Image (tube, rainbow, N blue to C red):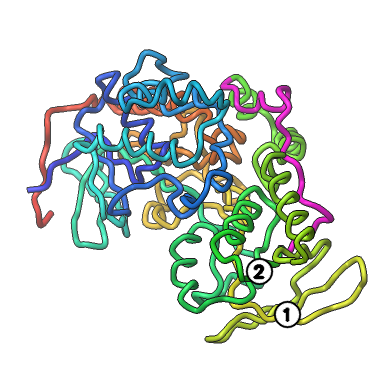
Amino acid sequence: MHPVYDVIGIGFGPANIALAIAMEEKGLYPNSLFLEKAANPVWQGEMLFEISLDTYSNIQNIPFRDLVTPRNPRSRYTFLNYLHENGLFFEHLNMDMLMPMRPDYARYIAWVVDLLRERLRTSCDVQHIERWPQAEGPDLYRVSCADGSVYHARHLVLGTGRSPRLPELFSGLHSERVFHQSRYNTALANLQRHAPKRIAVVGSSQSAVEIIMHLSKTLPDTQIHSIIRRYAYPLKDTSPFMSEIFFPTFTDAYYNADQATKARIDADAFRTNYGACDMDILEELYKQMYYDKLHGRQQIHLHRLTDIQSVNVDEQGVDLRLFDQMTQLPSDVRFDAVVLATGFTNLGQDGQQSLPLLHDLEASLQRSATGAMQIGRDYRVRLNAPTEQGAVVLNGLCESSHGMGDGGSLSLVSLRADSILAGLQAHDQLAHSAPAPLQEVALDA
């Protein structure tokens, strides 16, 4: 027999970790389970650099906006308590750092994961979700994983993260020599066996510059070419007024705004979170290039105002045709590899109207005239017959409807968990199906 869980969460990144914490602290939905694809969840593991202090970078987030503090400052799961319990408090305080190093924050998240292991199943690559009819009460959801394991739940919470955004010229390529930032460390380890002489980094974001700096130290004899469409790397907007987009009150205002107003806000707020860099990393890159020039070498090459017109990949390398808008001249350059630091897609934008995992639930989902899923303020996907099935919730995937604080940012994960739990309770009240004792369904059902 299969147990029936109150809630199954898919993915165990910061969004669903924060939800698991809230469930435990509030005593809600104790019969819940989280399924994670990775064997050992590591926060941003592909972008964790462990070679020198100046390439660690920071988390670009005030540590009090952690997995729990805005919701419950007295929690045992705060970043501050992580420092305390791991004997790091005074040393960390003594550095007078506004924002923690990224490896430190990754270890904080790993520490929390270890405390929540009873709620977690790892190496569970979810492949399929379907409605599972019941003779009495609302239908369940059947969740099938690549290893053949099957789980049943009354409610689903998807916290799978966003998909890589790939430029159109690169979208159909399958090569170890062209890779997105989301698999940077793994791909670089494979690439190093070939002793690359020239690598291109496409993009002008914080991640792009961090990758350039990391490559310059990891592969000191490799030429690194930064290809950007702009004249220069944009500076991130960190003004306190603009940073109010990470307030919970902004989420309410944004959700209730019409599409024209949302677009106006997005245009203003874009540089707070996307396609831009912090001043410290820009200064580090500039100093490195200046230092190299002092010593009669040039490792890092900047291609400004440059478009990529064509791509050709073979087993030995990648040929790019570049067009310099300043000189109006094309050039053909061969690289051993190309790193795409081009960010991630947003549900409801970038042509992505749904999630592949929800394909077999399509008949249950309400959609707008443009085909977009309808999502409530509490992150529940609106269903055609909500009393006939459990809730489907999107956790950390709702930037197009809820604003930037509800995309990839850590700032509001704890408060979002509160909203999600309130939504699940409201769904139970609507369906008159309050959490019941542990149920089971037949293995062959």
Q: Could you tell me which secondary element the residue under label 1 belongs to?
A: strand
Say what amino acid the circle numbered 2 marks: Ala
Image quarter of the C terminus: bottom left
Q: Is residue 239 magenta?
A: yes
Residue 333 to residue 146: above or below = below
Q: Which mark is residue 200?
A: 2
Question: Could you tell me residue 136's position as x and y percent?
Answer: 17, 37
Residue 343 to residue 92: above or below = below
Say left or right for 178 vs 279: left
Q: Could you tell me which secondary element the residue under label 2 belongs to?
A: strand
Question: Could you tell me residue 367's position as x and y percent?
Answer: 53, 46
- Can see residue 221? yes
Q: Which mark is residue 88?
A: none
Work out how far the residue at label 2 is from the one at label 1, CA to CA, in angstroms.
10 Å
- Please tell me which residue lies in front, 403 or 21: 21
Magenta region = 227-248
Which quadrant holds residue 108? top left
Given contact means CB atoms under 8 Å apart, are the residues at marks 2 and 1 in contact? yes
- Kindly identify the residue that appears in the image at 43 percent across and 63 percent down: 186
- Kindly identify the residue that appears in the image at 79 percent across and 58 percent down: 294
- Can see residue 430? no
Residue 16 to residue 160: above or below = above
Say left or right for 332 vs 91: right
- Please tell me which residue lies in front, 237 or 158: 237
Question: Could you tell me residue 7's position as x and y percent?
Answer: 27, 36
Question: Could you tell me residue 280's position as x and y percent?
Answer: 68, 39
Which quadrant holds residue 268? top right
Query: Within 10 Å of the Cα at label 1, are there few (<14), some (14-19), or many (20+) other Cα atoms?
Result: few
Say left or right for 329 vs 19: right
- Please tell me which residue lies in front, 70 or 260: 70
Q: Which mark is residue 333?
A: 1
Say what amino acid the circle numbered 1 marks: Val
